Image (cartoon, rainbow, N blue to C red):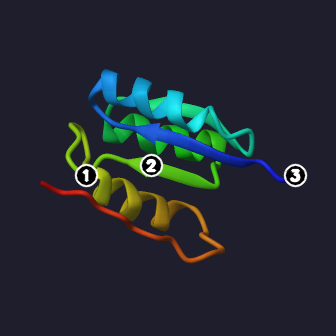
């Protein structure tokens, strides 16, 4: 069974904790990092090279869109990314 690695980036700790609890119920998913703002998310992605990054669209110090743009310039993304949004 192949593990899928993830990082979670959101400035709301309660949301990160709740999402972590849900994700950890699936043994194929492994959370390898968390970030509370966009700059920390960029650093986590570069450090851990996750398969999936769950990004908040509205974070301090770079929003989710800026995180995606920064990482596309820094690393080579082999597979096409997917952007899902739940904007209120």
Give how far apart the Cα atoms at labels 3 and 1 are. Answer: 31 Å
Name the foreground residue: 85 vs 40.
85
Classify mark 3: helix, strand or loop: loop
Query: Is label 1 in a helix, a strand or a loop?
Result: loop
Q: Residue at x 55, y 77 (%)?
A: 80
Q: Which mark is residue 54?
A: 2
Give the residue at mark 3.
1
What residue occupies the far bottom of the structure in this picture?
Answer: 80
Tell whether label 1 touches label 3 (CB within 8 Å).
no
Q: How far across and how far down the image is residue 23, in percent?
A: 56, 38
**Mark before the other along the chain sequence, 3 or 2:** 3
Q: Determine which residue is flagged by label 1.
A: 57
Q: Nearer the viewer, residue 18 or 42?
A: 18
Please identify the quadrant where the C terminus is shown. Answer: bottom left
Tell me residue 51's x, y (percent): 64, 55
Q: Is residue 53 above or below residue 79?
A: above
Residue drawn at point x = 62 percent, y = 39 percent:
47
């Amino acid at each position: 069974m192949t593990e899928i690695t993830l990082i979670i980036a959101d400035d709301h700790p309660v949301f990160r904790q709740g999402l972590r609890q849900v994700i950890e119920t699936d043994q194929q998913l492994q959370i390898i990092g968390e970030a509370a703002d966009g700059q920390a998310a960029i650093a986590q992605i570069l450090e851990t090279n996750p398969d999936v990054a769950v990004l908040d669209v509205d974070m301090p110090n770079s929003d989710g869109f800026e995180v995606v743009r920064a990482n596309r310039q820094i690393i080579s993304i082999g597979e096409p990314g997917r952007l899902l949004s739940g904007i209120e």
